[in-house]
Image (spheres, rainbow, N blue to C red):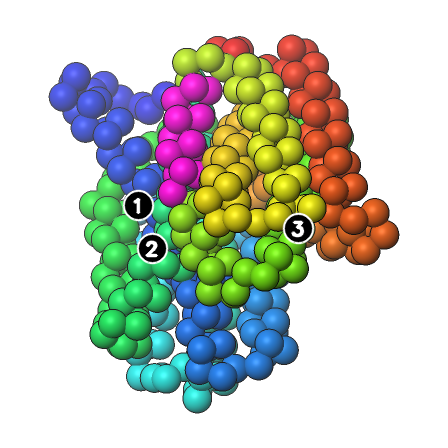
């Protein structure tokens, strides 16, 4: 995938830096608002007296993300050739994110305006999910095979950083200065990406975007090794991780931690090493290749899950538990980077949004289902039994993933 035309060295360097600047801005601001809605807003509403049942209803808005595959073909099908196919989606969607955040400013305190707050939050999540389709598709088309590790490291790291700022910093601003300054902060940071997208010129590609339709949703699985990767390796790798993570919050509650303490440690503090791990894993994929990082990520993730055994037994001293959660989140981030990188290998340039979204949504759906099963299983086999199953699944997924990459790794991707 190379750009058409001839570029001077200075122009090429500018183009390359522009790509990564664009990817960083898009993925950071995408989760900036999502992190606020799923973590920060929940805390603010609960503090204002909102019932747990209502908060549960708010969380169901997240279902928009896994079902976004239903309109991913539309993002591939329609777009402006002159303005840039995916850029013609990103500009209005990014603007929509900014306006949605600004639209929340009149509703203070939010606990007394639940109707409009939930409606605007739903619209925001719809915009962010669709923006993710276009951002992923553009990343697939802009990044070479050797650059995808770094690109996905930026994606995962940007997601965690956005969660830290949206779920942590915005709450602090709200506590200190109020609802309106918090919303203006989020809108201003999101507008930074809008400026970057407007300034970026999506290059013409030798491979043109195919007018993908709904009948093309499943054709991605026809590629060599794709079915075994998506239907065997990802479920084992992700179920193992999701099963381990699912018991963290209830185990912390059982150990006597307050909701505020859980939110600060698991939602903010533990996300910081995840950001660093994501960027490091992206660099390692570029240097070592997918196979080695997949194995390293699986082994580290299995060890990180074992670090949670004291918590599963009811012992949760602040120091050790915080370290264990940091190690777990860092390992989980590393696993995400290599999985997304291999998913991107299977996303075809002429239907990039549809393919990558399909593969990612399967992983996301698997995680949701696994989390529910894990909590139900914990009732019968206990937290320790769930963690044991989690380790076994991760290691099995790692072994099968390594075998898959030996057979199907892309040329130049190692």
Residue at 37% from the left image edge and 34% from the top image edge? 276
Residue at 70% from the left image edge and 19% from the top image edge? 399
Say which of marks 2 and 1 sits in front: 2
Q: Earlier in the sequence, mark 2 or mark 1?
A: 1
Question: Dot 1 corresponds to which residue?
Answer: 25
Question: Is 69 rendered above or below residue 60?
Answer: above
Q: Quadrant of residue 231?
A: top right
Q: Earlier in the sequence, mark 3 or mark 2?
A: 2
Question: Dot 2 corresponds to which residue?
Answer: 165
Report how far apart the C-alphas of labels 3 and 2 lie in the structure.
Answer: 31 Å
**Quarter of the figure that contains the N terminus:** top left
Q: Secondary structure at mark 2?
A: helix
Determine contact: label 3, label 2, CB under 8 Å.
Answer: no
Question: Dot 3 corresponds to which residue?
Answer: 314
Q: Horizontally, is 110 left or right of 401 in the view?
A: left
Residue 359: image location, x then y, percent: 62, 39
Q: Which residues are magenta?
A: 272-285
| Magenta residue check for 355 | no
Report crowding for label 3: few under 14, some 14 to 19, many 20 or more residues within 10 A (C-alpha).
some
Report crowding for label 2: few under 14, some 14 to 19, many 20 or more residues within 10 A (C-alpha).
many
Question: Which residue is more in the foreground, 103 or 157?
Answer: 157
Residue 87: image location, x then y, percent: 34, 47
Residue at 20% from the left image edge and 23% from the top image edge? 13
Residue 194: image location, x then y, percent: 27, 54
Q: Secondary structure at mark 3?
A: loop
Give the numbered dot on residue 113: none
Question: Which residue is more in the foreground, 396 or 133?
Answer: 396
Q: Quadrant of residue 165?
A: bottom left
Principal SS element in the magenta part? helix
Report how far apart the C-alphas of labels 2 and 1 lie in the structure.
Answer: 14 Å
Residue 123 in view: no
């Amino acid at each position: 995938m190379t750009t058409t035309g001839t570029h001077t060295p200075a122009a090429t360097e500018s183009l390359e830096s522009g790509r990564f600047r664009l990817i960083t801005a898009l993925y950071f601001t995408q989760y900036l608002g999502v992190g606020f809605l799923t973590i920060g807003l929940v805390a603010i509403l609960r503090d204002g007296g909102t019932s747990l049942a209502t908060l549960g209803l708010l969380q169901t808005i997240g279902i928009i993300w896994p079902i976004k595959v239903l309109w991913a073909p539309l993002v591939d099908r329609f777009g402006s050739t002159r303005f840039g196919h995916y850029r013609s989606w990103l500009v209005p969607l990014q603007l929509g994110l900014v306006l949605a955040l600004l639209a929340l400013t009149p509703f203070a305190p939010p606990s007394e305006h639940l109707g409009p707050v939930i409606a605007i939050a739903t619209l925001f999540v719809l915009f962010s999910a669709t923006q993710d389709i276009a951002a992923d598709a553009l990343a697939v088309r802009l990044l070479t095979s050797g650059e995808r590790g770094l690109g996905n490291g930026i994606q995962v790291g940007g997601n965690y950083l956005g969660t830290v700022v949206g779920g942590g910093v915005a709450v602090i601003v709200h506590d200190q200065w109020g609802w309106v300054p918090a919303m203006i902060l989020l809108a201003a940071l999101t507008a930074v990406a809008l400026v970057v997208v407007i300034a970026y010129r999506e290059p013409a590609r030798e491979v043109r975007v195919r007018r993908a339709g709904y009948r093309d949703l499943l054709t991605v699985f026809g590629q060599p090794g794709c079915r075994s990767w998506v239907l065997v390796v990802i479920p084992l790798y992700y179920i193992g991780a999701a099963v381990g993570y699912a018991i963290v919050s209830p185990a912390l509650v059982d150990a006597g931690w307050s909701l505020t303490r859980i939110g600060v440690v698991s939602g903010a503090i533990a996300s910081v090493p995840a950001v660093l791990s994501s960027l490091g894993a992206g660099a390692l994929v570029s240097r070592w290749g997918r196979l080695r990082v997949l194995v390293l990520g699986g082994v580290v993730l299995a060890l990180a899950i074992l670090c949670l055994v004291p918590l599963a037994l009811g012992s949760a001293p602040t120091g050790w538990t915080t370290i264990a959660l940091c190690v777990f989140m860092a390992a989980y981030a590393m696993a995400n980077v290599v999985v997304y990188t291999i998913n991107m290998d299977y996303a075809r340039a002429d239907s990039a949004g549809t393919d990558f979204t399909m593969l990612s949504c399967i992983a996301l759906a698997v995680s949701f289902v696994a989390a529910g099963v894990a909590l139900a299983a914990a009732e019968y086999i206990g937290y320790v039994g769930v963690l044991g199953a989690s380790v076994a699944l991760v290691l099995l997924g790692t072994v099968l993933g390594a075998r898959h990459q030996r057979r199907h790794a892309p040329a130049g991707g190692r």
